[in-house]
Image (cartoon, helix red, strand yellow):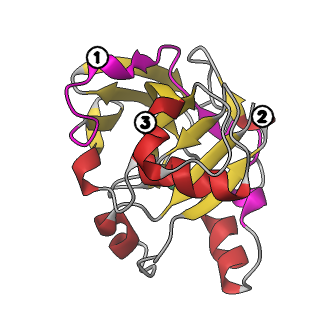
Amino acid sequence: MRIFAVGRNYVEHIEELNNQRPDEPVIFTKPDTALLKNNAPFYYPDFSSDVHHEVELVIRISKDGKNIVEKFAHKYYDRIGIGVDFTARDLQSKLKEKGLPWDLAKGFDGSAPVSPRFIPVHDFKDVRNINFHLNVDGVLKQKGNTSLMLFPFDYIISYISRFFTLRVGDLIFTGTPKGVGPVTIGNLLTAYIENEKLLEFEVR
Ligand code: MG
């Protein structure tokens, strides 16, 4: 199982971090030790003092594939969940300045909480119009809709599969909408697709 992620996929989030709008998806990976399951708590790491939440829809690959044509990409994922792409923003900013890889800032242990339940794709009327949001301590912090993605699910799958063979069970974090911000110890994070709460965990 691998975790792939897309950076800079929502215009207003690109603007809030003063990043450039990419011509192709910005892809990075996280190791499987980043995965945080079953609403387990997130332990704040000692190497950062500015860990940010990035709520993202996560798609689950259901069929092995290489060089998948965009037109057929919808056959390669069967479920959609929600997760948080935790980012050590202070560390990432330093690495970005020097043009170095983001791995340490993005792939550390526990940096990829995902919802225990993933919703079958056929339960959605239109995957290009899915609402999702994140609350911190009951206060709305991030709200997104898949219609605002620069690169939709099918394009992302097709693009990643040019470089990496996709395998059953792989997860793809599909980018965060605006509103990213720091978390602190004691916060309770809850993430929703439409109005269904799918993910809930504490920062310790
Ligand atoms: Mg992200």
Q: Which residue is mark 3?
A: 74
Please provide percent x and percent y for residue 94: 69, 77
Residue 129 is left or right of residue 159, and the answer is: left
Q: Residue at x 39, y 71 (%)?
A: 14
CA–CA distance between discs 1 and 3? 14 Å
Residue 175 visible here = no
Give the alpha-carbon distance from disc 1 to disc 2, as whole Å.
28 Å
Q: What is the magenta segment's predominant secondary structure?
A: loop
Q: Amino acid at mark 1?
A: Asp
Please give the name of the residue rendered at 25% of the width and 36% of the height, measured from the top-left corner.
130
- Give the Cα separation between the discs numbered 3 and 2: 24 Å
Task: Name the spot of residue 202 as percent of width and height, x first.
Answer: 53, 25
- Residue that label 2 marks: 32
Please, what is the three-letter code of the amino acid marked with disc 2? Asp
Residue 195 x, y percent position in the rendering: 21, 22
- Side of 157 where 111 appears, left or right: right
